[in-house]
Amino acid sequence: GEDVEQSLFLSVREGDSSVINCTYTDSSSTYLYWYKQEPGAGLQLLTYIFSNMDMKQDQRLTVLLNKKDKHLSLRIADTQTGDSAIYFCALNTGNQFYFGTGTSLTVIP
Amino acid sequence: NAGVTQTPKFQVLKTGQSMTLQCAQDMNHNSMYWYRQDPGMGLRLIYYSASEGTTDKGEVPNGYNVSRLNKREFSLRLESAAPSQTSVYFCASRWGVSQYFGPGTRLLVL
């Protein structure tokens, strides 16, 4: 299987940028994803990047992919209190998806 | 569209009891998945069904069985529940590159 690692916690002040990092072991993934999970809810797809891309921007979200270092990051600009949640990176290989451990983002007002 | 729905929302079982977790999607998706979520471990794939009539094991299938009843429904069965199966269970369906998740079932096995 795939090993997908994330740091468990991140705290930022409202208005600052947040950067959530993810490392993985298998380079055969076709797509890489970021999901958001709010308390008591399921996972919501935020964005994804195709494996032959280096960067993708979607409003306040910027995804960076470094295939050489097997490193994926999610930058949230102008972080708001509503961004407080758990963020999961995930990789897709064929029919299977592999998820990281999740990073709990706390936004301090 | 309701998207992906799961029942029940919460369940408490005693060790050795059996139960079936239900999942349905109204988006006409071919692929469906069952995951469990445990603290500090992210989501782990239990079983998936790439299309109606097919099922395949994921990373942690032991102690579970699944049935793809039709294109809409994919159920997960615990034949003899164990405390190690205490978890939050998520069902998902897939269209193209994206997965869509249900709200989850919280299961406690005593």
Image (cartoon, coloured by chain):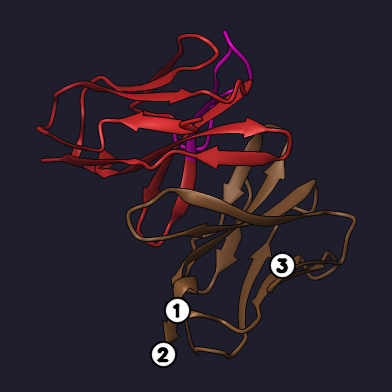
Q: CA distance from mark 2 to mark 3?
A: 27 Å
Subunit under mark 2: A
Numbered marks: total: 3
Q: Which picture quadrant has residue B53?
A: top right
Per the rendering, the colour in which chain B appears is red
Q: Do the CB atoms of the residues marked 2 and 1 lie less than 8 Å apart?
A: yes
Q: Is residue B73 above or below residue B8?
A: above
Q: Which residues are magenta?
A: B45-60
Q: Position of residue A87 (x, y in %)?
A: 52, 64
Going by the numbered disc 1, the residue's amino acid type is: Thr
- Label 1 sits on residue: A81
Residue B76 falls left or right of residue A27: left
Asked which quadrant contains residue A97, the reply is top right
B52 to the left or right of A49: left
Element class at badge 3: strand
Please rate how many residues cluster around mark 1, counting C-alpha atoms within 10 Å: few if below 14, some from 14 to 19, many from 20.
Answer: some
Q: Work out whether disc 2 and disc 1 sit on a shared chain.
A: yes
Kind of residue sitting beneath label 2: Pro
Q: Are marks 2 and 3 on the same chain?
A: yes
Q: Are marks 3 and 1 in contact (CB under 8 Å)?
A: no
Label 3 belongs to which residue?
A: A72
Q: Are marks 2 and 3 in contact (CB under 8 Å)?
A: no
Q: In terms of secondary structure, where does tag 2 sit?
A: loop
Q: Residue at x 69, y 44 (%)?
A: A92
